[in-house]
Image (cartoon, grey):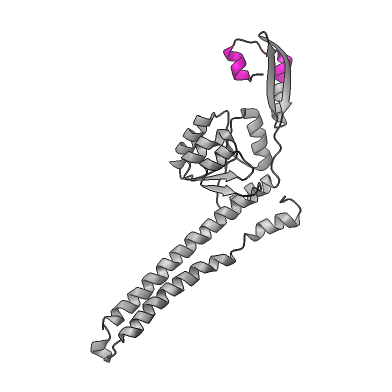
Amino acid sequence: MVNKTLMADHNVALPVDSEEILAAAEGMAQTGIIVSINREVVGVLAVSDPLKPAAQEVISILKSMKIRSIMVTGDNWGTANSIAREVGIETVIAEAKPEQKAEQVKDLQASGYRGMVGDGINDSPALVAADVGMAIGAGTDIAIEAADIVLMKSNLEDVITAIDLSRKTFSRIRLNYVWALGYNLLGIPIAAGALFPSTRFQLPPWIAGAAMAASSVSVVCCSLLLKYYRRPKKLDNLEIRGISIE
C-alpha cells in the first residue's frame, strides 16, 4: 500500500477511476490508500481518523482568546483542507514528514508562535522544537516524553485550561513583583530614616523586621490563591451541551 507520491516515484500509472475515488475520499476528510501489485493498481482504500469531541468548539474558543491555530499534518492536502474547514482552522500545512514538522515549527517561532499540540510519534520532533510542547494523555509514549506539558485526559478542552492556567500563573507572578517592589520602595526609605528630619519619626527595628516578614507572607498568600483556580466558564458550557467526554 502506497500513496500517490510513492506511486509516482515507482512509475506506477494511476487509473482515472482511482483518481476519482481518491478525490472523493479526500473531500470527505478521509485518507486514500492505494494498493498496488506488480506495478498495477488493484484497489483504493479510504480510512479516516474521527475528530476529537468538541474540536470545532475548542478552535472557536482559542480564537476568542486571540490564539491562532495552524494545522501541521502528514496527511494529503485534500484531507487536511477538508478537516480544517470542518473545525474552523484557516491555515494548513500538509504532507509534512516528522522532520519537516519540526522545521515548520521553527519557522513559525520566528513569527511569534510558541506552542505545539500533538499525540503521535510523528509529532515528537515538533514537540521538542516548540517552545511549549503539549502531548495528549492518550498519545504515544514518545510524544509524551518529548512534550513539556502532558494533558492527563484526551480532551482537547484541557489545552484551553492549560493555556488559561499558565496565563493566570504569570499574571500572579507579575502581581507579586509589583507588590514586593512597591512595598520595598515605600518601606526601605522609611526604615532608613527618610521621615526623621521632618517628622522626627523613626521606625523601630523590630517593626521593620516584621514588615519585611509580612511582605514575604503576602507574596506567598497571593500565590496560594491559585489553589482556587477554576477553568474558563466557556468549557463548562460545552459540558452542559453534552460535548465534552471525560
- Residue farthest right in this picture: 242
Q: Is residue 13 magenta?
A: yes
- Residue farthest top in this picture: 38
The quarter of the image holding the N terminus is top right
Front position in the image: 2 or 84 = 2
> Is residue 182 something one can see in this rendering?
yes
> Is residue 61 something one can see in this rendering?
no
Residue 92 vs 246, above or below: the answer is: above
Q: x and y percent of residue 119 in the render?
A: 60, 40
Q: Is residue 25 left or right of residue 173?
A: right
Q: x and y percent of residue 214 in the render?
A: 42, 77
Q: Is residue 194 left or right of residue 57?
A: left
Hey, which quadrant is residue 77 in on the image?
top right
Hey, which quadrant is residue 207 in on the image?
bottom left
- Residue farthest left in this picture: 197
- Residue at 52% across, 56% down: 166
Front position in the image: 178 or 24 = 178
- Residue at 51% across, 37% down: 126
- Residue at 67% across, 42% down: 87
- Residue at 67% across, 45% down: 55
Q: x and y percent of residue 230 in the render?
A: 61, 63
Instruction: Provide the residue span drawn in magenta.
Output: 1-20
Residue 34 vs 222, above or below: the answer is: above
Residue 71 vs 195, above or below: the answer is: above
